[in-house]
Image: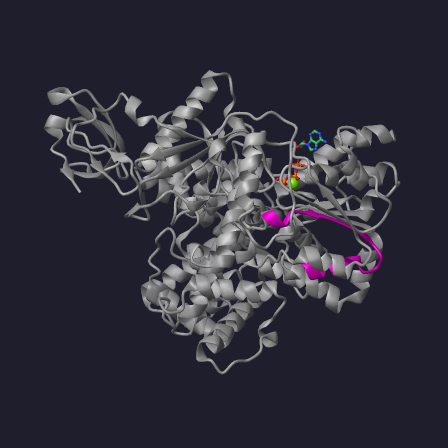
Amino acid sequence: MDVETLLDGLNDRQRDAVAAPLENLLVLAGAGSGKTRVLVHRIAWLLGVERAATSSILAVTFTNKAAAEMRGRIEKLLGGQLGYGHGGMWIGTFHGIAHRLLRGHHLDAGLAQDFQILDGDDQLRLVKRVIRSLNLDEKQWLPRSVMGFINGKKDDGLRPGDVVPSHDPTARTYLKLYQLYQETCDRAGLVDFAELLLRAHELWLHKPHILQHYQQRFRHILVDEFQDTNAIQYAWVRMLASGGSHVMIVGDDDQSIYGWRGAKVENISRFLQDFPGARTIRLEQNYRSTATILKAANQLIANNSERLGKELWTDGADGEPISVYAAYNEIDEARFITGRLKHWRQEGGVLTDCAILYRNNAQSRILEEALMQEQLPYRIYGGLRFFERQEIKDAMAYLRLLGNRGDDASFERVVNTPARGIGDRTVGLIRDAARERGLNLWQAAWALCDEKRLAGRAASAVSQFLALINRLDSDTTDLPLHVQTDRVIRESGLWSLYEAEKSEKGQSRIENLEELVNATRTFQPNEEMADMAPLTAFVAHAALEAGESQAAEFDEAVQLMTLHSAKGLEFPLVFIVGVEEGMFPSQQSAEEHGRLEEERRLCYVGMTRAMQKLYLTHAESRRLYGKEMYHKPSRFLKELPEACLEEVRLRTQVSWAQPVASSNRFSSGFVQQSFDSTGFRLGQRVLHSKFGEGTVLNYEGVGPQSRIQVNFDGLGSKWLVVAYARLQAL
Ligand code: ATP
Ligand code: MG
């Protein structure tokens, strides 16, 4: 192996890290300084120069996509395939690796062979059921808080029995809910995300011979984005490494953004204590962003107090200033962005190089609308996921039930979807029977039918449902997965259900179902799933990886994602939207020092994704979650050096509206225009006698000819002549 190729394209510090002797290493460095690049080269170095066996390497990345990219880059460096089999390198997320371990050792982990993964949505549904089964009020016992409690305990490695009992009645109820939830999962063979990690950790604790096996195997452990590991992940790595493996962790304390989910940035300093003699290497040169973007990001993060302290520099060009755009409202904000994107494309740029980042998933809808209207293709990365769509979850629930009748969440989801005359009362009876007799819902339903305990119509509906599932199973089990899926969708009645929905929504649901069949046809189980039945593998794949990639991955499309999911990525052109007080930082975090600092780190992560050009936008008023809100520009904007910013003033140039003399001023100091020619304001909510409520998108012309474009809820946008439309302002 040519040592020089492995060190090519690296600076001295990076080379130091890549070619370090076999020892424990911490690479601590800011955004875009080449940490991930170093990790990739280090693996290639271990394989090519240190002659490490591929099977001796375990690499942990933050997303499955990053894992795939990393594998590709290493193969390119080494000029050969790494192999996926059991003797190959393990590379994946903590969850993916834990899943692989548990599949391989399900008996030792106390799991059924066909255990299934519960995604966030399923988990929430199950938590709700548990709350209801104790006759508690969901308004008082918020399902999301209960779920947060359960996951928090698991992330800290605590089973219900490990939680110190409290006299506080609230704490006791939470604990009881946790216990009941866990019993339900165990009975049905369901494993949530936090459980994957906890079980993998318990496997180390309770089965020393298995731990020892992996300690001897994984001599080299490498972890990217270490600042966002939680307690259980840390403990897991530490135990695995304690047989004398070499660990390289790379991270940036300034990019720790998952504290709210239990990540512990202190793990970086703990590593230095727990692995005595570990060497720290700092990288300070940034290769990603222009000097202007970097300077602004550096100055922003300097406002945080709890930092390990790093400076970043670049010898790149200053580049363009960061553009700040103050929009009237979210619609104007979205239109501004589509305008810039069109311009980018006209200048020869490709859309795939552009990313729009937002704080909350809900912000994407209006952006999506604007992009669709302008026919700019886009892709949502980790947002509204394909596998989270209603019709897909319905179809998946049938498939899951075929694979595991004990899957109560799926049973509940489809027992009456499509409607087959099994009402809430009957489901309630089944639930009660299950609870009283310690059965799952499937078994309880059988028992009730057997014992003729259900009323005539309900009884026949339930037994028909049970027969349907059994028949689907026996008829399709030997067919290829996509044929099986297609038949399940049709014979379950889902297809007709959505086909009968004569709206656009129904049409897109049918398209999604078709896409699901497509997905099962092209599905390639990854390495840890290679030995599983295709159906089980697909179901696990859907739960585990769904969020990360979508069908149109390779198409030319603008990338939309939350700031959180942008971690580790880079794009030539970046928009961060909704940079407003109350949005970013969010209302709650603005009031708490620790959380405010985490929001600032999130802003730092967002800004440092940009390579050439960064736009920051904020809106004076915004309709979100059905409410109109007025926001001031974010404090983060004020924390940026003025010399790096440029304010975009488009409003005076807009041609699609006529500004009027009587304008009123808002407290932010910006001019709020209203439009005499139509009497309506951009973004205003209006009512039409036939089309219902909608939002004003656009205007054209003046006087009696003036036309107005309104996006009617559920109907889409229409152009109307103002004089005849008789719109009513809301
Ligand atoms: P983040 O903290 O955002 O994860 P990072 O530290 O992992 O960033 P990388 O993604 O590895 O940084 O690198 C940032 C960019 O700089 C990449 O495009 C990478 O290819 C490039 N890069 C890294 N090191 C060098 C170098 N020595 N010479 C040229 N380009 C480099
Ligand atoms: Mg990185």
Left or right of residue 138: residue 238: right
Residue 363 occupies quadrant: top left
Q: Foreground residue, 311 or 524?
A: 311
Q: Foreground residue, 535 or 298?
A: 298
Residue lying furthest top: 347
Left or right of residue 493: residue 485: right
The residue located at (49%, 28%) in the rendering is 321
Up-down relation of residue 684 to residue 589 (above or below): above
Regarding ligand 1, which quadrant of the image does it lie in? top right
Up-down relation of residue 166 to residue 256 (above or below): below
The residue located at (49%, 50%) in the rendering is 599
Q: Which residues are magenta?
A: 234-254
Q: Position of residue 1 (x, y in %)?
A: 88, 31
Up-down relation of residue 515 to residue 122 (above or below): above
Assign the C terminus to one quadrant of the image.
Answer: top left
Residue 470 visible at all: no
